[in-house]
Each structure stands twice: as C-alpha cells, then as structure tokens.
Image (cartoon, helix red, strand yellow):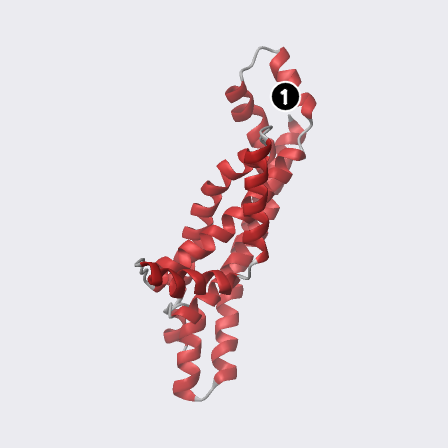
Amino acid sequence: MLTQIASGIGLTAYITLASLGIGGVAALPLVAARRSTWLPLRAAATVYIDVVRSIPPITWLFLIYFGLPQYALRLDSVTASILGFSVIASAYMAETYRSGLLGIRRGQWEAATALGMGFFATARSIITPQAFRVTLPAVAAYAIALLKDSALASTIGVHEITYQAGAASRATYEGLLAFCIAGALYIAMSAPLALAARRVDRTLRQKVEVA
C-alpha cells in the first residue's frame, strides 16, 4: 500500500512546483499593474486578483478541465491542474509581492536616487533583497498550502498522492490506513520546505543585521 500511495509523490511535487513557478512569474506583471498610477490598469489588476481569490480552487479546476473542452480546448488532467493552480497562485503571489514592497520605506528609493542610482539598479541591489526577505515566510506558507491544495487534482483524475490513497483504500478496504499514509507523506514533503524557509529567513536577517 505504501508503495502505491508513494508513487503519487512525483506528480504532487511536479504540480506544486510548476504551479508555484508559473504563478510566481505571472504575479510580477500583476503586482506592477496593481501599483500602477494608471487607474484603468490598476483597477483591472485588482478585479482579476479579487475574482481569482474569490473562486474555490476546485471550481477553477472544473472550469478548466470540464468547461474549456466546450470551446474546443481540451487539456489533459495534469496540464489543467497546473493551469488552474497557476492562475490561483498568480493572484495570491501578486498580493504577497505587493505587501513586501509596501513594507519597504519610500525613503530608500529617494536615498538611492540621491546617490545617483537608476531605477533598475535600485530595484536589483536595494529593494529586491529586502522584499525577498520580507515575503519569504508568506511565499513558503503559500507553497505549503499549494502542496496541500494539489490533492484537489485527484478530482479530475490526476494520479497524485490522494488519488493513489483513494485507489488503495478501495482495493484493500483500509481507508483509515491509506489516508493516514497519505497524510504522513504530505507532512514529510511540507516539513523540509518550512524548515528550509526558516533557515533562509534567519540567514538573511543576520546578514541585514551585520550590514
């Protein structure tokens, strides 16, 4: 049973990492639009983020997997899962990035400008390292939440951990054991991520304090 359930680890990790990566990149133009001085662009980004976050993840998966084929766009279950979770991740990560940028005082931009630094040099050397440190705990927490949400992919036939646990429970009639094993696997995957995030955050804080 353990071997069967553990066979879903690969797809669980793949969906989580791919969705987090795509969503994290897609969030960059979103946060830029969200902070734009042009009202229509800022309003459009705000509406997108609010709408995406208001719809349950499972509904997004069903909309993409069962709804898009009506418009001649049929995706396999893994691709549909990654697309759905990436859309959701982009909205949540955009707000995470925005909160990190808001945590940096405006005076640092002004000081860099006074020193003759350009926009991109300031963003790369001064703002981004600080924003990364500020947002790291929230990003790590969302990554763990996304790992757990990936279990919803089982509802559209992705053979990840929860799907394999369900198959094992039906075959052996030992549902409690099967899903306890699945839970333990999720813990085993989440714990190293949380520990790594804490360690990186602690290291970054020490460097800032030394500086």
Name the residue tied to disc 1.
Answer: 109
Amino acid beneath label 1:
Trp
Residue at the location (66% across, 34% down)? 102
Image check: 78 left or right of 51?
Answer: left
Residue at the location (42% across, 73% down)? 163
What is the quadrant of the C terminus in the image? top right
Up the image or down, 175 lies above or below 19; here it is below
Residue 80 location, quadrant: bottom left
Residue at the location (35% across, 58% down)? 79
Q: Residues within 10 Å of mark 1 (few under 14, many from 20)?
A: some
Image check: 16 left or right of 96?
Answer: left
Up the image or down, 121 lies above or below 25; here it is above
Q: Nearer the viewer, residue 53 or 206?
A: 53
Q: Secondary structure at mark 1?
A: helix
Q: Nearer the viewer, residue 79 or 112?
A: 79
What is the quadrant of the N terminus in the image? bottom left
Asked if one can make out residue 188 in the rendered structure from this viewpoint, the answer is no
Q: What is the x, y in percent for residue 179?
A: 50, 77
Q: What is the x, y in percent for residue 97?
A: 58, 39
Q: Nearer the viewer, residue 90 or 208?
A: 90
